[in-house]
Image: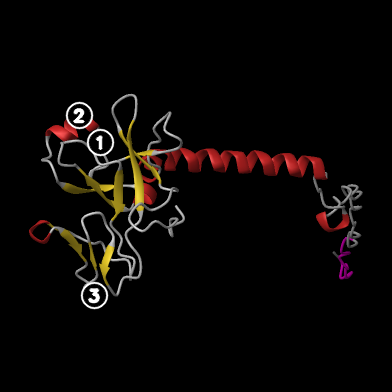
Amino acid sequence: MNGVAVTARHPPASATVTAPHPPRAARAPRMATASSEEPMVPDMNKRNTMNLLLAGAATTVALAALGPYTYFFVPKSAGGTGGGLAARDAAGSVLKAQPYLASHAAGSRELVLGLQGEATWLIVDTDKALEPFALNAVCTHLGCVVPWVPAENKFKCPCHGSQYDRNGKVIRGPAPLSLALEHVDVSGDGEIVLSSWKDEDFRTGEMPWWKF
C-alpha cells in the first residue's frame, strides 16, 4: 500500500426511530353508581298488597300447623241445648247418657270435664237417672279439687278441711261458698250436656255467685 495510512470509516450510527403510539381507545362511559340514582321504592299500594299477601301466607301456615291441636282445647258444642257443652271423660271422649248410666251405680259420683274444662262431679241419683245438676269440683276457698268421700256422704277438701254436703252446699269452712252448679241435660243424640246454671241456687235460695 506504499506506506499510505488508510483510515477505516465507521458507518454512521443509525438514527433511533421511535414508533408512534397507537391512538388510545376511547374510554367506555362510566356507569352511574347506585349512590347517584334514586332508590327504587315501591308505591304504597304495592307495598300494602305485598304485606297482605305475606300475612295471609303466614296465617295459612300457622292455622295448618295448629289445626290438629285445636280439637283438644275447644270442647265440642252440642246442638239444641242453649250453648251447652258435651261432658267428657278424662281421655276427652264425649259421654253418652245410656252407656254412662249402664256402667254407674245409683248414687255414684264421678269426675268429668265440665264447663271451662274444669273438673265437675256428675251425679247418678237413686233411681239410676242423671241428676239435673252437676257440681264444679273446685273448692271455693283456694281452688283445690274436692273429692267425694262415700263413707261420710260428703265432699271433703284435703287442702284446708272445707266440707260440702252431698249436693255441694258448704257445711264447714274455711270455704266461704257452696260449689258452683251446672245444668245437666241429654241432647237428641244421647250426649250428656252441661250448661251454665243461672237460676236461683236451690240449696241457698240465692242467685248464683259464679259467673260462668
**CB atoms of marks 2 and 1 within 8 Å:** no
- The answer to whether residue 111 is left or right of residue 17 is left
Residue that protrudes farthest toward the top in the picture: 189
Q: What is the spatial separation of the Cα atoms under label 3 and label 1, in whole angstroms?
A: 32 Å
Amino acid under disc 1: Leu
Residue that protrudes farthest toward the left in the picture: 151
Amino acid under disc 3: His
The spot of residue 205 in percent (x, y) is: 39, 56
Q: Nearer the viewer, residue 85 or 208?
A: 208
Q: Nearer the viewer, residue 8 or 33?
A: 33
Q: What is the spatial separation of the Cα atoms under label 3 and label 2, in whole angstroms?
A: 37 Å
Asked if 20 appears above or below 131 in the picture, the reply is below
The spot of residue 102 in percent (x, y) is: 13, 32
Please tell me which of labels 3 and 2 falls first in the chain: 2
Label 1 element class:
loop
- The answer to whether residue 196 is left or right of residue 54 is left
Residue bearing mark 2 = 98
The spot of residue 21 in percent (x, y) is: 90, 53
Label 3 element class:
loop
Label 2 element class:
helix
In this view, the mark in front (3 or 1): 3
Residue bearing mark 1 = 95
In this view, the mark in front (2 or 1): 2
Q: Give the residue at x 21% y 55%.
A: 166
Q: Residues within 10 Å of mark 1 (few under 14, many from 20)?
A: some
Asked whether residue 36 is drawn in magenta, I would say: no
Amino acid under disc 2: Gln
Magenta stretch: give its range.
Answer: 2-11
Q: What is the spatial separation of the Cα atoms under label 2 and label 1, in whole angstroms?
A: 9 Å
Which secondary structure class fits the magenta region best?
A: loop
Q: Nearer the viewer, residue 149 or 152?
A: 152
Residue bearing mark 3 = 160
